[in-house]
Amino acid sequence: MCESSNVDTTGLDDAALAALVVELQAQADRLEAVRLRVMGEWDARAVWALDGACNGAAWLAARGNVARSAVGGFLRDARRLRHMPATAAAIGDGLLAPAKARLLARAVNERTAEAFARDEQLLVDTVAGLTVDEAAQLIRFWQRNADQDGPDPRDRDANVLSLSQTFSGRWQINGNVDVESGTVLHGVLSAYVEEARGPARAGRGIDGDGAASACRCAGRYGEAEHRRR
């Protein structure tokens, strides 16, 4: 790594400053490539369990300045890359940016795994010469063709639920869950919201206040379900 942190950027001309930005981005990519390889192995071995953590994201969030949701996504991509030989090799050789590799990793699931194994080298070679935005567009096109039916409505492995805080401090929830889990969650949320509102506010749907209260109830429900399994 260069000593760019000690550079007086105010004394650089435009060309030198642009060159420094390019060099820093290259260094960041090299570091990201190492992180994906090392942390993928670390997570696969479940080294975090030695400290009693429930998963790698929780372990890292407790020890570093990282958000649990963000590092959880990073680890998920790193785990998948361990089973993507052409992609991993291209990252290691500096031929593929980590950001593009992570896009490829997110395109792999049970329904696309066979097609990806067939097309991996072609995809790697193609996206290597594109910008990240162009690569994302191409990968979405490939995924639509490889996974035309989308996830099975009953497939729990395809469940995704995220909770992220915006710059204003508010929280945003996004998710896509299977039929059974969605039905259970909707029932729990609806019942708790109606109870919290009282008769005067019944029948209006789930608002923000009700949903926040319901999430606390849903958390208790999830813990109970986990203990029963």
Image (cartoon, rainbow, N blue to C red):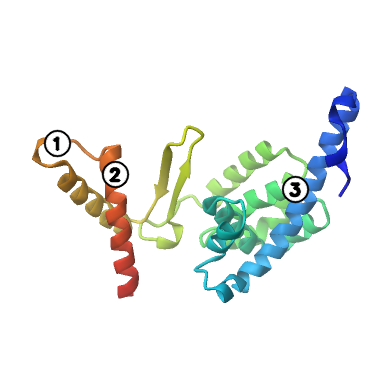
How many discs appear?
3
Residue 138's quadrant in the figure?
A: top right
Question: Considering the numbered disc 2 on the image, is that residue within a helix, a strand or a loop?
Answer: helix
Q: Which residue is mark 3?
A: 97
Picture quadrant where residue 127 is located: top right
User: Where's residue 90, x and y in %?
Assistant: 78, 56
Residue 49 seen in the figure: yes
Q: Which residue is mark 1?
A: 201
Residue type beneath disc 1: Arg
Q: Is residue 194 above or below residue 116?
A: above
Q: Is residue 3 above or below residue 15?
A: below
Nearest-to-viewer mark from 3 and 1:
1
**Which residue extends farthest top?**
14
The spot of residue 148 in percent (x, y) is: 48, 49
The mark nearer the N terminus, 3 or 1, is 3
The reply to whether residue 107 is visible in this rendering is no
Q: Earlier in the sequence, mark 3 or mark 2?
A: 3
Tell me how far mark 2 sits from mark 1, CA to CA.
14 Å
Q: Distance between the Cα atoms at labels 3 and 2?
A: 40 Å
Residue type at mark 3 is: Ala
Residue drawn at the location 40% of the way across and 61% of the way down: 155
Could you say which is closer to the camera, residue 212 or residue 33? 212
Q: In this rendering, which labeled residue sits more in front, label 3 or label 2?
A: 2
Residue 135: image x %, image y %? Answer: 67, 41
